[in-house]
Image (cartoon, coloured by chain):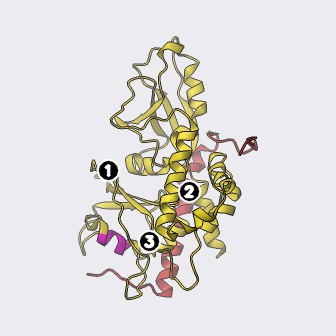
Amino acid sequence: QSMTLSVTPAQTAAWRRQILEQLGERSKREMDNFKHYEQAVEQSVWVKKGSM
Amino acid sequence: MADDKDVLRDVWFGRIPTCFTLNQDEATEREAEPYYLLLPRVSYLTLVTDKVKKHFLKVMKAEDVGEMWFEYEGTPLKWHNPIGVLFDLHAFNTVLPWSITVHFKNFPDRDLLHCLSNTVVEAHFMSSIKEADALKHKSQVINDMQKKDHKQLWMGLQNDKFDQFWAMNRKLMEYPTEEEGFRYIPFRIYQTMSDRPFIQKLFRPVSPEGKVHTLGTLLKEMYPVALPNDGEQKLYQVVIHGIEPLLETPVQWLSEHLSHPDNFLHICIIPVPTE
């Protein structure tokens, strides 16, 4: 059984760094070639509803 | 800590490029062109597809239009799961854009919940948040909020307003300084090869001996098949928000940073594609 149950600072850096890298790769893969697509939810319009 | 804030933004602003095509059996007055959209990974299909509906209704007769539903390669897509979860579970290793078929008839009652307005999505979303807070804080945080605060969470999601959402959601991510995390981690594990909707059990962020629980320890307890044996080839990918975190990643950190807006950590177990 090789699984590590405790987390050392070095490993902490490794898992966090790996997540940041992969999120960057995900953006490239899923968004870079599709920037011309329309957004499903428009960011430019502030939608305000009267009653809360 | 700046990096961790970046993670929250990356998670929120994840998009899936999608091509919607009308089901061939739908009666149309003229040919329906496909419709291309960037779908927010953290939102819900029925909440962000008004434009798709409008586009296809232009070529259909009103009497042929029933409740809209979506299908991917023969599988009806459960709108009540976040879009990113649907994509990771059914289409993670496929070529983009994601190709979804749109239907307006033969609603699959046995597979899908009806969703005729956004209030249905809102009720589902808020009930998930409440369930998550029951696990994390015995419901204390969500119950201390006012109705307008609940509304702020919902409106933040609905209108894709990161700051509006997180101004309130950060309260749901806090825990007492004397504790090492939430009471229990709200998580759900999905598998493609099972009729079971998901695995969800009580799981603490730290062991009784004080050891930090990781993604690996969570899977070892909940779904050990997903873990590779020493020296053997990996059979499954463990995917959260389109990435494969290391098994050493603490579940408390994952819960705080890679949960969906519904406050659940959604984990997809998918078979490694064969060449």
Chain with red colouring: A
Please name the residue that numbered disc 3 is placed on: B184
For the point 55% across and 86% down, the residue is B178
Q: Which residue is mark 2?
A: B261
Q: Secondary structure at mark 1?
A: loop
Query: Is disc 2 placed on a helix, strand or loop?
Result: loop
Residues in magenta? Answer: B216-221
Q: Residue at x 50, y 87 (%)?
A: A9
Q: In the visual, does B31 lie left or right of A1?
A: right
Q: Earlier in the sequence, mark 3 or mark 2?
A: 3
Q: Circle 3: is it few (<14), some (14-19), or many (20+) Cα within 10 Å?
A: many
Q: Check chain identity for marks 1 and 2: say if they share one.
A: yes
In 3D space, how far apart are the residues under numbered discs 1 and 2 (Cα atoms)? 23 Å
Q: Residues within 10 Å of mark 2 (few under 14, many from 20)?
A: many
User: Could you tell me what secondary structure mostly forms the magenta stretch?
Assistant: helix
Chain B appears what colour? yellow
Pick the front one: B120 or B271: B120
Q: Estimate the x, y position of residue B91 in percent, counting from the top left.
A: 40, 46
Asked if residue B217 lies in the magenta stretch, the reply is yes
B65 up-or-down from B49: above or below: above
In the image, what residue occupies the spot 50% across and 81% down? A12
Location of mark 1 (residue): B192
